[in-house]
Image (cartoon, grey):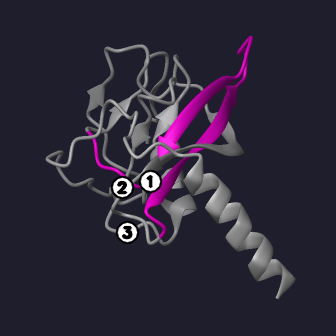
Amino acid sequence: MKRIFFFLILLFSAVSCMSTKSTLKNVDDNAPDLILKKDNTFAITLFAKDKKYGYDPDYPVNIFYRNTKDEALNETRFLNALAGPKGEKITYKRMETCCPFPTKRSDMGAGFLNVYELTWEGQKKPITLYLNIYEKGILMVPMGLSLKQN
């Protein structure tokens, strides 16, 4: 019972601090549906020209795919398609959840961004990407990264 009460208080606090207007700048409900490749990664053909794409919480990588029930799966499908700038194998870890925003694709009426740190051999400083599983957008490779070669 205490856990439920604590969760409700936490949820209320997060939602009450949230603006009713989204700050996300790159949501596109008309974006084409994401396509899965045979290796269970997303098929990505475009490369971002905006250096904010994926690196700024207002311009996250929007990876909504059918539902949000298994968020880690959709994030993995995106991240496993990427490589370092010269094709290096990347490793990644989820650092935190942040940046609440209103969305109709969540039972709570709110979504959160998941923050990932990406590293690869020879890299001087890890990079941070913001991923959004709740909204659609044109899926692209963020600047400074490349696609994994199969």
Residue 133, labelled with which disc?
1
Which residue has dot 3 on it?
Answer: 67
First to last magenta residue range? 108-137
The picture places residue 136, in percent across and down from the top left corner, at 29, 48
Residues packed near mark 1 inside 10 Å, few (<14), some (14 to 19) or many (20 plus): many
Residue at 64% over, 38% down: 116
Q: Name the one closer to the observer, 109 or 133.
A: 109
Q: Secondary structure at mark 1?
A: loop
In the rendered image, the vertical position of residue 84 relative to residue 49, given as above or below: below
Disc 1 + disc 3, Cβ < 8 Å? no
Magenta highlight on residue 132: yes
Is the C terminus in the top left, top right, bottom left or bottom right quadrant?
top left
In the rendered image, the vertical position of residue 5 relative to residue 138, given as above or below: below
The picture places residue 85, in percent across and down from the top left corner, at 52, 17
The picture places residue 45, in percent across and down from the top left corner, at 26, 34
Which residue type does callout 3 highlight? Asn
The picture places residue 22, in percent across and down from the top left corner, at 38, 40
Which residue type does callout 2 highlight? Phe
Residue 64, labelled with which disc?
2
Residue at 36% over, 63% down: 105
Q: Quadrant of residue 48?
A: top left
Lateral position of residue 143 relative to residue 14, left or right: left
Q: CA distance from mark 2 to mark 3?
A: 7 Å
Q: Name the one closer to the observer, 143 or 122.
A: 143
Lateral position of residue 11 relative to residue 37, left or right: right
Instruction: Give the residue furthest to the right.
Output: 2
In the rendered image, the vertical position of residue 140 relative to residue 85, given as above or below: below
Q: Secondary structure at mark 2?
A: loop
Disc 2 + disc 1, Cβ < 8 Å? yes
